[in-house]
Amino acid sequence: MRRPKTVAVLVAAVVAATAGAALAVLGVPVGESSPAEAVPSARPSADGQGVTASPAPADVDDTVTADDYCYVEAMIYYRVKEEELAQTLLRKDDIAPAAESFAKRVLGDDLAELDGLRAWYVSWAPARPLEAPADGPCGGHGSDHAQMPGMPTWSAEQGLVDAQSPDAERRYAEIARDQNAGMVALVTLILDGDPHPDVRDSAEDVLEREKTDAAELAALLAP
């Protein structure tokens, strides 16, 4: 996946974001008791002419659109949540080896992917819409992306926190399966449009990874 060059003009954008957004962008670990608070909150805005964004500095890629930025923000939410779920499972005792191996691989894959996503999140901030979009690939995600397809409910997450093996492995796999389906739905919408080349590469990588994940999760959920 290609990486955009880092742009150093957006410290103010990070400062202006919520404390939770800054934690997610900077990669600070989040406790399982405050899962959604650590990922960047969407602040997409529109006037009568459609979605608008802050003026971009001259050295920022002006081909990046609000949809590109929304994709990056949404994927950070998905991957940070995925990390939290994996860490929740791995803190438990006597986890089945296959589930433990899957969760550890997820953590490693997410670490590599989030590195690139966070760089885009910062350098592409001028394309960030100011209000949550009502339509488009990220339409209906809400102001904090909590309504994204596949994001686990509080009760589902709490059920995983409270569960022990072997129920914990099944709960984890069910949540991961549903979240993966949500990610596939998002990247499919993105690829149906005209995304930035870096976003297209990222979305295609997500689809390839989800094929591997789906096979392993199906095995974990097999009777």
Image (tube, helix red, strand yellow):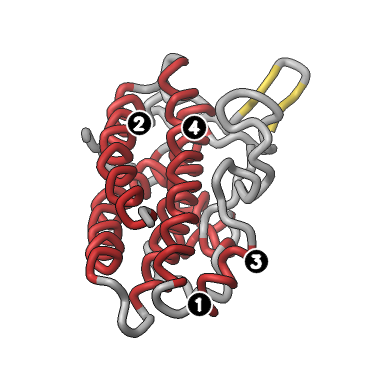
Q: Is residue 149 visible?
A: yes
Three-letter code, disc 4: Leu
Residue positioned 33% across, 46% down in the render: 119
Marks 3 and 4, Cα distance to the nearest angstrom? 24 Å
Marks 4 and 2, Cα distance to the nearest angstrom? 9 Å
Q: Closer to us: mark 1 or mark 2?
A: 1
- For label 3, the residue is 155
Q: Bin the neighbour count of mark 4 within 10 Å (Cα to Cα): few under 14, some 14-19, many 20 and up.
A: some
Measuring from the top left, give residue 136's x and y in whole percent.
60, 23
Q: Element under label 4?
A: helix
Q: Element under label 1?
A: loop
Q: Element under label 3?
A: helix
Q: Element under label 2?
A: helix
Measuring from the top left, give residue 163's x and y in whole percent.
50, 77
- For label 1, the residue is 163
- Residue at the bottom extreme of this rendering: 93
Give the camera-side residue of 146 and 27.
146
Measuring from the top left, give residue 33's x and y in whole percent.
57, 76
Marks 1 and 4, Cα distance to the nearest angstrom? 30 Å
Q: Is residue 19 visible?
A: no
User: Mark number for residue 203?
Assistant: 2
User: Mark number for residue 223?
Assistant: none
Is mark 1 in CB contact (under 8 Å) with mark 3? no
- Residue at the front extreme of this rendering: 223
Give the camera-side residue of 64 and 15.
64
- For label 4, the residue is 186
Q: Quadrant of the N terminus?
A: top left
The earlier-in-sequence mark between 1 and 2 is 1
The earlier-in-sequence mark between 3 and 4 is 3
Is mark 4 in CB contact (under 8 Å) with mark 2? no
Residue positioned 44% across, 71% down in the render: 168
